[in-house]
Amino acid sequence: NAGVTQTPKFRILKIGQSMTLQCTQDMNHNYMYWYRQDPGMGLKLIYYSVGAGITDKGEVPNGYNVSRSTTEDFPLRLELAAPSQTSVYFCASSSTGYGIQYFGAGTRLSVL
Amino acid sequence: AQTVTQSQPEMSVQEAETVTLSCTYDTSESDYYLFWYKQPPSRQMILVIRQEAYKQQNATENRFSVNFQKAAKSFSLKISDSQLGDAAMYFCAYRSAETSGSRLTFGEGTQLTVNP
């Protein structure tokens, strides 16, 4: 059972570089989410999607972009990486807007 | 906006003993869900238990149970017969049931240590 798969697991970026964090789910869930977790803190929502072609901002969207061209994939794009984006990033999905969210294993990103 | 507060940054318990983790929240909504997630060192977020606000009965999952006090906006997690594998960071989270697709709002977490 794959569930929610995130790649890469770990990445180091230089300031100003760009990258895409990949997220794929095989549960046919319509709802997908991106969170970030700063050290010693809870998770905060970056962006979410309620279905293919529909995305919306969360609590901390600045510096990020998303797209949702298929039900399965929800990539998160970082443009012009900054040290403040050093964090652990989690992707999650749920079958309904009120359903349980299932999380991927996270991507640890360091921007130096 | 909703907020979730976990006032215990760290807790410890002896193996086989019982421990209670505290969580309070603030909301003006009447319909919502509350969750406890466990995050072991592997970083994986694992759902421990879920409570629906309209249900008066406290949720239970094996050794895990909650004390849900809606009027007091309190949602504590009790772990009975603690095991070494329970050691992890525990997050309390809130989710609206009045807005579809709404995010989880997390507390800052409680680091639980289980002593052998």
Image (cartoon, coloured by chain):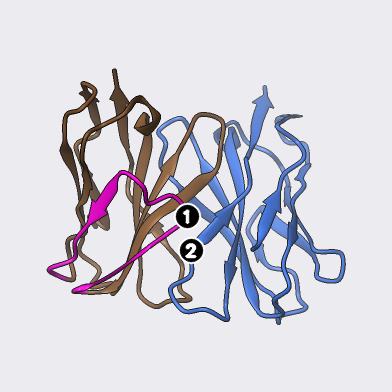
Chain colours: A brown, B blue
Q: Image point 24% across, 57% down: which residue? A: A1
The C terminus of chain B - image quarter: top right
Residue at 35% across, 75% down:
A95
Tell me whether circle 1 and circle 2 mark residues in contact (CB < 8 Å).
yes
Q: Quadrant of the N terminus of chain B?
A: bottom right
- Is-magenta flag for residue B111? no
Farthest-out residue, right:
B72
The answer to whether tags 1 and 2 share a subunit is: no
Residue drawn at (60%, 46%) of the image: B91
Type of amino acid under label 2: Arg
**Viewer-side residue, B29 vs A72:** B29
**Residue A28 position (above or below residue A37):** below
Q: What kind of element bears circle 2? A: loop
Image position, residue A72 (x, y; %): 17, 65
What amino acid does circle 1 point to?
Glu
Query: Where is residue B87 drawn, in percent x and y?
Result: 59, 32
The chain ID associated with circle 2 is: B
From the viewer's perspective, tell me whether residue B39 is left or right of residue A79: right
Which residue is label 2 attached to? B103
Dominant SS of magenta comes to loop
User: In the image, is residue A63 part of the stretch drawn in magenta?
Assistant: yes
Can you tell which quarter of the image residue A96 is in?
Answer: bottom left
Taking depth in this image into account, of A111 and B36 the one nearest to the observer is A111
Which disc, if any, is residue B65? none
Tell me the tag on residue A59.
1
Magenta stretch in the rendered image: A52-70
Q: Residues within 10 Å of mark 1 (few under 14, many from 20)?
A: few
Residue that appears at 47% across and 34% down: A38
Residue A14 to residue A71: above or below: above
